[in-house]
Every structure is written in structure tokens, then in C-alpha cells.
Image (cartoon, coloured by chain):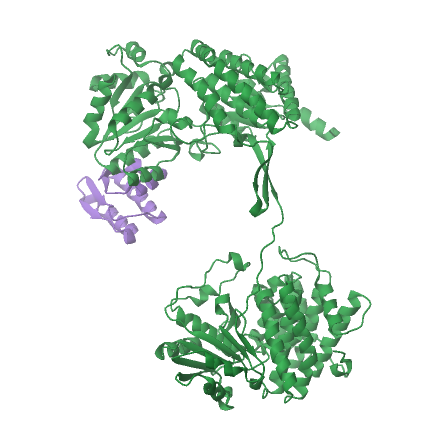
């Protein structure tokens, strides 16, 4: 301990210490010291050790149950000895039955399917306050629970019950130590005082307080600043509903209320009885030994057993027999009277008997309806019993459920005695306890029946989980020249061909039409806009509905196919809310929105790609342009994937150079981004690498020699293969930048991708400022993967850095060869305009989910930096062409 | 005097009830049987109504309030300001 700590220790004087003599402080410190040592030694004990000791303690508790019960009654003058014997036995045997099979040492639970392990850690030293009402049973219970969990306890008994508690502690301690428990594991304050309790509650070496006592002790515990368990006051309402088994109900209540003369705080206090059965219930009580008070007797009870000043029960009445109470207050009753019952007409101070009464006196209320009964039960519950216990006798499950919903009680006992029922394990499956948590209603931290788990710190060891991955693509992909002929095999009554005007003019629609089955009715829906908006989609849906289409052929590039996907979605599920479906998400598995599975109509979607390309013919994505807000909206779900993909190069032979370059670079970007994505897998890597190889080899050829069938075919395949990769591995930051920039400045997608590509490769390959916090990230490998690409392309380089540099260089050469502008400035966008748009560009980029699979997490400042790098780009193109580097 | 309380316009109905306190003849009954749940605005208006009714010595009875509504009134300490009937 450092000097500062020592000084700090010495100046910390617990609040009550000033009122304690030095000798007393020394005594209390010694108790804590030996408990602390015992707790430390205890941590080495095994499960077998503690179970052996506990078993012996339980047997000792059972053997001494009667003696301890007698001592308790003699000392406290409260309760019934015979019932206290039962309590001591419940505290031993029933608690043992619950704990004996439970693991409380080391690994206590394992969840192999979740890679989770729970490990027990003892709390340490507890300071435990025990009550006057259940003195020895509470001690037995807490000793057993403490040893089972390897904790040491200092007991602070009630001053009027300390001798019987001390005896119980002695028996438990001697038994425990005899069977191997560490010395000092239990101790009991002699002649305890409030300052003693306060001192121990604030003691630095006491880890937790378990206060089973009155409100003052519980409040002191929670106010001490230490972790604490407490209990609350009870005022148990009992609803006897008209469908109840009245014979059982009445006997249960008598058993419960007279048990130990009503000292258990969960015992019944006010019976709320349905009008229909009120008189018969009271008669049953009377027949079984209850005295039903008349009006004058009720008034007498009110002013004698309840303190008129405070509204609380008179302490002298607690735990006394009904006949003794009657005699004491001057009430004439039969000698064998078990209970005194008095009728009340309301709840509150003006109805004194509606308060808690820990003696055999019951209040009864006549309820004229279920609503009234529940209201009164709520009133009783709120009159000093929040969080504790409530009881209902009924056979109506709806009423029982409602009762449970509206009453704030940690224990809701159904068709059984309240006091013994709440103890647990006797009439029901509640955990056995002698300490009832009352939750926030009672100012406690739990509503549980306190048990072994409250005496443990449970540690959770979480091993890394490996999420299962997938590789999902349409199960029918037809490729190579004239692959479109395969659509003949798909029967259709009514097919809508969704396309753009240019493709209709150059005869591609006719090619498709010729290959549809002869009996198919065919209609053409032309999408006028290169980047369709919602209105176009809705018109398409109208056409689908009008013609009752069962098949859609999307003939076009990415925009057309995406539009067709969304049309299909809306056609099949008219109530689908596209705005909601486009909601952002972080993890596909955990996303909030669910795509519709119920379909009003069904249509097969065949995608015939006419660019090489977005690969939309195989992807689960659909992008819609929101021109009004200058952004793109992305829908993503595997249900959007086309049913059939046709990758037929005849449809791309006439692609103009600009379109060839734009869509070709889009394909390359897909492949490169999928290759370094956090979601990359061996399945996607093989596709990505193949697509990269094909694009670098064939795109320049297809650009320069558009009639080269092999080049066109290979590029067309490359686009589809790249799409298969990114459909499962996703794209990355390049696409997020391109989406944002393209939407804002109306630049074609491929062209936008090209502006950022070399900069993003350099960015991703560098050591990140911030790694992507993704469970899919296994080390930083982007730079190595780029180097692998360089190897695949036959580029030179002795180190990863060199290879990455060469890859960037060859990419730039490719962009030069394809005639791309090499900077945003070249597009005629002024610096001022670009600067004005920057905040929006950065925000939209960061909002785009595309970057979430990027190997490097982009900071906003880095996004801005990339935009500026792309703005300035390179000022002149490199003259050598990629063909000079051909080594493929 | 009896006033029906429609859940959809509960707060305005309660403001209307407040205006009728003087002509209520010492007791005003509000029929809550169609009110499934109460919101913060309704609670606020109930509180206002209770306060003014107390000043004018008018007893306000809530008739047919379901037990869930009663629980909310209990938690917000409004039950002691009203009488309840089935």
C-alpha cells in the first residue's frame, strides 16, 4: 500500500466510529479481519469441498432445529415454537434440496453453442443483518448459502434476538470448521448496537451487506455505498375470487396467518372477497376457529393493535396469539380462537386495520365487482407492501393473469398460503429463501427470493464466435453467345419486357421476344430514364398488374435490372413500404426490417444484362435514385436476386466505347473491393480474383476492338463473376464515394468509381488510422491481398509495398487507356462548387452502408481527403498503355 | 351530471368537464368505460380537474375506469382525488 493510500485509509473514519469505544472498534475490526482471511482462504476450495461442508451443516441444522426454535421463542417472546422448528427445517433441508446440485465454484455454466462460459467468483465478506421475527432460520439459511458460495459472514442480529442467533451461528460455525471450512468464516456480534451495524456497513473490508431486517436497517444498507441486498415491508392483499375453492382457500389462509403467529412478512393482511361469496367465506372462517368482529370490536381493534400516531402495527402485538391479543385489549373470544377478523370499508390511515399486521388479525373487504376487488388490492399493495407479496384464490385464469399484471409484488402466490408459499419450495417452485427482495417498490435491488446466485459475482468468459457465412447466387446462370435461347424453357402466360428506349430501337427487344415461348403474351415496358425514380417503378407495377404478368424479363444495364427488381417486389407485395425497406442496417443478420415473404402475385424475374457491367443480373441489390434529395436509395435482400441470369455477349457487342469503359471499370471495382472486403471468403476470393484477371486482360481489348467476340464475352462473364463475389462479400469505400459523388454531380457510376479507384487502393493498403470494428476482420490483410492481385497480374515487386504501388500504377494506366478523366476538376466542377458540396458529400458517403465492409474504417476527415485527392487527381495521363504490360 | 370520456379526445373532454363544474350540482361523474389507456396529457388534465373540483367542493366520480388506468392513477397519486364507481 503506498503512502498516499495509507494516509487515505487513516483519514477515512466511518460515520458511527466516533460513538464506539476503541475496544469495540478493535473487536469489530478483528471480526472483519478474520472474515477477510477466511474468505481469501475459501477461494481455493473446490465444489466437492464446499458441498461436503454444506451437507454437514444442513444435518446439524436439522438436528438442532428444535433447540434453536425454543431458544428463539424464549428470547424474543414472539411466534410459535413448533412453527419455528418447521422454519428451521425448511431453512436447512429445503434450501439444501435447492442448492445441492448447483455449481457454485469455478465453471458453473457453459453455453457451447454461444462460446460462453460462466465462472463463479465469491463476493467476499458479507455483513448480514437478521430479523427478530425469523432469527435462527435466517441464520441457518444464510450460513448454508454463504458456505456454498465460499463467502464469510459477520452476523448482526436483532438486539432482542442476538443470543439465539449467536447459538445458531455457533452450531453452523463449528460444524463447518470441523468439516474443513476456514476458521473465521462466521461470526456473530455480541450485544449488537446500531453504531456496530453502521461501522460494519461502512467497513472497507466488508464487500456486501445483506440486510434482512426492518426499514431502518435496509435503508442504512443501501445508503452505505456498498453493494447491498435488502428486503421490504409487506402488506399482502389476498383476493378471494368467486370461482375459488373456498374450503382450501380458508384453510390455507388460516394455516398461513397463524403460522408462527403471523410473523412472516409475506403473510396475508387484507382479504378482498367477492360479494357473492363474502358471507359464506366468513362463515367458514368462523367454523374453523376465527372470531368475526362486530362493529364495536372492530373499532376496539383499530385503536389498540395499530398505533394511532404512526398508523403502523403495535410492536407488542407482533407474533402474539390471537387469544393473547384479545385478552390484552379486552376482547371476549372463545378459548380456541385462531384469528381475529374485522371488516374494513377502505384502505388508508382512516382504515387502520388495512395496514400490515404481523399477528393473527385479518382485515376483510367486501368487493362488489372484479374491478373493485382489483382496485382495493392495488390500494393495499401500495399501502406499505409494494414489491413484496400478493395472493389470489381463483380458478379463473384471466383474472389470475390480470391480478399478476396490476399488482406490484415480487411473489404472486396462487391458490396457496401466502407466508409459507412465499418462502418457496414448499407449495410451489419458487426458490427457497428467508430474504424476500421487493424490487424498486420496496427500495431493493431485486425482487428475487435471495439465494446463492446473489452471493456470487458471475464472470462470463466470451470466446470469439465465428459467424457462419454464405455464398448465394441465382441458381440458373446461362452464359456465352446466344445464351438468351434458354429463356424458351420458362413457360409464361404473360411476360413484360422491361427495357430502355435504345435497346428497343437497336432490336435487342426483338431478340428476346423471338426466344420467348410462342404462347406467351409479351408486352414491353420502356424505362425512359437512365436512373429511374419511384414514379417509373410505380408505372411499371401498374403495367405488371394490368397484364397480370407472371414473368418479367429485364433487358438492360444495372438501372433497368434494378428497376425491374423493385417493380417485382412491389408487384408481388403491394403493401411493401420501400422507404422502410431501404432503412440502414449494420449487420444483415440483425437488421430491423424484414422483406415481405407473403406474396399476392408471383412473377419470375429473368435478367438479361446488356452491359459488362453492374452484374445486377445476379445481385441482391437494387439502387433507386432520389433526385429530389440528390442521393441514391439502396435496397438489399437476397429475395431481390433475379431467378435467372442471362449473360449473353451478343447484347454487348454494340456497346459504345464510353459505356464499355464505364461499366468495365465498375466490374473491376466490384472485384477489387470484394477481394479486400471484410466479408471476403475463399468462395468470393476465387470469383474476385478471376474477375480482376479477366478485366485487366479483356477490357482494353473490348474498348479498342468492340467487335472482338472473345473480349466481349470474357468481359461480360467478368462482370457477372465479379457480381457473384460482391453479392456475398459486398463492396467498399470506393462505391460509397462514387454513390455520393455520382448522385450529387450527375456523374455515371462507372466514371465516378474510376475517379476514386487508385486513391482508394492506396488508402486501403496503408496502415489504417482506424481498423474496422468488425467480427469478420481477421488481422489486417488488405495490403497482402492487393499484392496477391499484383502477383496474379504478373506485376513485378519484391515487397508488398512495391507490388501495391505497381498495382496502382497499372490501374492508372488502364484508366488512361480507357480515356477516363483523371480528376474531378477535369469534369468542369469548380473548386468552389466542390468545396460547397463537401459537407454533404462526406455525410452521404458516411451514411452509405457500402463502406461497412471496407477493410479500413474511414474517418470523416479521411473521406474528405479522398474527395480532394480525386478532385486534383493527376494532371496528365501516362502515355504507355496496358497492352505493353501484357503478361497474362 | 354525467360526461362520457372518449379516449381519442380525452383531454378536451376533461377541459369541457372543468367548465361544467359550477353547474354539476356538487357531483360530477365521468364515464371512463371506453378509455383503455391514458396518456400524459390526460393525466395533466385530470390533475387540473381534481384541483379545481376541490376548490369548488365538487365530488368527481370516475365510473368504469379499468384497472390498468386505475394503476396509472395510483402511481401518479391521483386516486386519492377522485371517487371510483363501476
Picture quadrant of residue A126: top right
In the image, residue A69 lies at what x, y percent? 44, 13
> Could you say which is closer to the camera, residue A140 or residue A487?
A487
- Does A333 appear above or below A255? above
Q: Colour of chain A?
A: green
In the image, residue B78 lies at what x, y percent? 32, 39
In the rendered image, which quarter contains the N terminus of chain A? top right
Picture quadrant of residue A786: bottom right
> Could you say which is closer to the camera, residue A95 or residue A863?
A95
In the image, residue A13 lies at what x, y percent? 63, 23
> Which chain did the image draw in purple?
B
In the rendered image, which quarter contains the C terminus of chain A? bottom right
> Could you say which is closer to the camera, residue A481 or residue B15?
A481
A127 vs A806, left or right, is left
> Could you say which is closer to the camera, residue A176 or residue A263?
A176
A742 vs A133, left or right, is right
In the image, residue A213 lies at what x, y percent? 47, 22
Picture quadrant of residue A789: bottom right
Residue occupying the far front of the picture: A489
Amino acid at each position: 500500500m503506498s503512502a498516499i493510500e495509507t494516509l487515505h485509509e487513516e483519514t477515512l473514519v466511518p460515520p458511527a466510529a466516533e460513538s464506539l469505544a476503541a475496544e469495540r472498534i478493535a473487536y469489530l475490526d478483528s471480526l472483519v479481519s478474520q472474515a477477510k482471511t477466511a474468505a481469501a482462504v475459501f477461494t481455493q476450495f473446490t465444489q466437492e469441498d464446499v458441498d461436503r461442508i454444506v451437507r454437514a451443516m444442513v444435518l446439524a441444522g436439522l438436528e438442532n432445529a428444535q433447540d434453536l426454535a425454543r431458544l428463539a421463542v424464549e428470547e424474543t417472546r414472539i411466534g410459535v415454537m413448533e412453527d419455528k422448528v418447521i422454519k428451521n427445517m425448511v431453512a436447512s433441508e429445503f434450501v439444501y434440496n435447492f442448492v445441492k446440485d448447483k455449481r457454485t465454484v469455478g465453471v458453473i455454466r457453459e453455453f457451447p453453442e454461444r462460446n460462453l462460459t460462466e465462472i463463479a467468483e465469491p463476493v467476499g465478506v458479507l455483513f448480514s443483518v437478521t430479523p427478530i421475527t425469523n432469527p435462527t432460520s435466517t441464520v441457518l439459511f444464510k450460513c448454508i448459502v454463504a458456505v456454498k458460495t465460499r463467502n464469510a459472514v459477520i452476523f448482526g442480529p436483532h438486539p432482542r434476538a442476538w443470543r439465539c442467533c449467536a447459538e445458531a451461528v455457533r452450531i453452523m460455525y463449528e460444524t463447518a470448521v470441523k468439516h474443513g471450512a476456514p476458521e473465521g468464516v462466521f461470526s456473530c456480534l455480541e450485544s449488537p448496537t446500531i453504531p456496530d451495524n453502521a461501522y460494519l456497513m461502512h467497513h472497507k473490508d466488508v464487500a456486501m451487506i445483506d440486510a434482512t431486517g426492518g426499514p431502518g436497517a435496509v435503508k442504512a444498507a443501501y445508503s452505505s455505498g456498498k453493494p447491498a441486498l435488502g428486503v421490504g415491508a409487506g402488506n399482502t392483499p389476498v383476493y378471494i375470487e368467486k370461482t375459488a375453492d373456498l374450503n382450501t382457500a380458508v384453510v390455507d389462509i388460516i394455516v398461513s396467518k397463524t403460522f408462527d403467529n403471523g410473523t412472516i412478512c409475506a403473510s396475508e393482511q387484507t382479504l378482498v372477497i367477492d360479494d357473492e361469496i363474502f358471507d359464506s367465506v366468513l362463515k367458514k372462517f368462523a367454523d374453523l376457529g376465527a372470531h368475526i368482529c362486530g362493529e364495536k370490536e372492530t373499532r376496539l381493534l383499530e385503536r389498540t393493535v395499530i398505533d394511532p400516531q404512526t398508523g403502523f402495527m403495535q410492536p407488542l402485538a407482533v407474533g402474539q396469539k390471537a387469544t393473547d391479543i384479545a385478552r390484552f385489549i379486552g376482547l371476549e373470544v372463545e378459548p380456541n380462537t385462531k384469528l381475529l377478523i374485522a371488516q374494513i370499508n377502505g384502505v388508508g390511515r382512516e382504515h387502520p386495520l388495512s395496514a400490515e399486521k404481523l399477528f393473527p388479525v385479518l382485515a376483510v373487504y367486501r368487493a362488489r365487482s372484479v374491478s373493485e376487488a382489483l382496485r382495493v388490492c392495488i390500494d393495499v399493495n401500495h399501502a406499505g407492501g409494494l414489491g413484496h407479496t400478493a395472493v389470489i384464490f381463483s380458478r379463473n385464469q384471466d383474472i389470475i393473469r390480470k391480478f399478476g399484471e396490476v399488482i406490484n409484488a415480487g411473489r404472486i402466490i396462487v391458490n396457496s398460503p401466502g407466508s409459507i408459499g412465499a418462502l418457496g419450495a414448499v407449495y410451489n417452485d419458487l426458490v427457497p429463501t428467508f430474504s424476500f427482495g421487493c424490487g424498486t417498490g420496496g427500495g431493493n435491488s431485486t425482487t428475487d427470493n435471495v439465494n446463492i446466485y446473489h452471493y456470487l459475482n458471475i464472470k462470463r468468459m466470451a470466446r470469439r464466435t465465428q459467424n457462419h457465412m454464405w455464398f448465394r447466387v441465382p441458381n440458373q446462370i446461362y452464359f456465352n453467345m446466344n445464351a438468351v435461347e434458354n429463356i424458351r424453357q420458362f413457360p409464361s402466360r404473360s411476360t413484360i419486357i422491361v427495357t430502355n428506349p435504345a435497346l428497343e430501337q437497336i432490336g435487342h427487344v426483338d431478340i428476346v421476344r423471338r426466344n420467348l415461348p410462342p404462347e406467351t403474351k409479351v408486352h414491353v415496358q420502356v424505362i425512359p430514364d437512365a436512373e429511374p425514380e419511384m414514379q417509373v417503378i410505380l408505372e411499371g407495377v401498374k403495367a405488371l398488374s394490368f397484364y397480370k404478368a407472371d414473368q418479367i424479363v429485364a433487358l438492360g444495364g444495372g438501372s433497368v435490372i434494378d428497376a425491374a427488381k423493385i417493380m417485382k417486389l412491389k408487384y408481388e407485395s403491394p403493401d411493401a413500404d420501400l422507404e422502410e425497406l431501404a432503412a440502414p442496417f449494420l449487420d444483415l443478420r440483425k437488421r430491423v426490417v424484414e422483406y415481405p415473404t407473403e406474396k399476392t402475385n408471383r412473377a419470375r424475374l429473368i435478367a438479361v444484362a446488356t452491359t459488362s457491367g453492374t452484374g445486377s443480373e445476379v445481385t441482391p441489390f437494387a439502387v433507386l435514385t432520389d433526385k429530389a434529395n440528390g442521393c441514391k436509395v439502396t435496397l438489399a435482400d437476397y429475395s431481390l436476386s433475379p431467378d435467372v441470369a442471362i449473360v449473353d455477349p451478343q447484347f454487348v457487342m454494340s456497346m459504345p466505347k464510353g459505356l464499355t469503359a464505364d461499366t468495365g471499370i465498375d466490374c473491376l471495382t466490384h472485384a477489387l473491393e470484394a477481394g479486400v472486403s471484410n466479408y471476403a471468403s475463399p468462395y468470393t476470393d476465387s470469383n474476385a480474383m478471376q474477375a480482376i484477371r479477366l478485366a485487366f486482360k479483356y477490357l482494353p481489348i473490348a474498348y479498342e476492338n468492340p467487335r472482338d467476340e472473345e473480349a466481349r464475352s470474357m468481359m461480360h462473364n467478368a462482370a457477372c463473376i465479379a457480381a457473384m463475389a460482391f453479392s456475398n462479400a459486398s463492396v467498399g469505400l470506393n462505391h460509397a464515394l462514387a454513390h455520393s459523388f455520382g448522385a450529387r454531380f450527375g456523374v455515371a457510376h462507372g466514371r465516378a468509381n474510376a475517379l476514386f479507384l487508385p486513391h482508394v487502393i492506396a488508402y486501403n493498403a496503408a496502415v489504417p488510422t482506424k481498423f474496422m470494428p468488425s467480427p469478420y476482420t481477421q488481422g489486417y490483410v488488405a495490403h497482402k491481398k492487393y499484392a496477391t492481385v499484383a502477383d496474379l497480374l504478373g506485376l513485378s515487386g519484391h515487397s508488398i509495398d512495391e507490388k501495391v504501388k505497381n498495382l496502382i500504377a497499372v490501374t492508372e494506366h488502364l484508366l488512361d487507356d480507357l480515356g477516363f478523366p483523371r480528376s474531378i476538376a477535369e469534369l468542369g466542377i469548380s473548386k468552389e462548387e466542390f468545396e460547397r458540396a463537401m459537407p454533404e458529400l462526406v455525410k452521404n458517403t458516411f451514411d452509405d452502408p457500402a463502406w461497412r465492409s471496407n477493410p479500413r474504417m474511414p474517418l470523416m476527415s479521411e473521406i474528405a481527403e479522398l474527395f480532394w485527392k480525386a478532385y486534383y487527381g493527376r494532371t496528365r495521363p501516362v502515355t504507355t498503355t496496358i497492352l505493353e504490360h501484357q503478361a497474362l | 351530471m354525467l360526461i362520457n370520456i372518449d379516449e381519442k379526445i380525452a383531454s378536451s373532454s376533461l377541459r369541457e368537464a372543468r367548465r361544467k363544474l359550477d353547474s354539476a350540482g356538487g357531483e360530477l361523474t365521468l364515464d371512463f368505460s371506453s378509455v383503455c389507456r391514458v396518456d400524459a396529457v390526460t393525466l395533466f388534465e385530470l390533475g387540473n380537474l381534481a384541483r379545481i373540483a376541490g376548490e369548488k367542493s365538487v365530488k368527481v366520480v370516475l365510473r368504469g375506469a379499468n384497472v390498468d388506468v386505475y394503476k396509472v392513477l395510483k402511481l401518479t397519486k391521483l386516486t386519492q382525488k377522485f371517487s371510483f364507481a363501476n
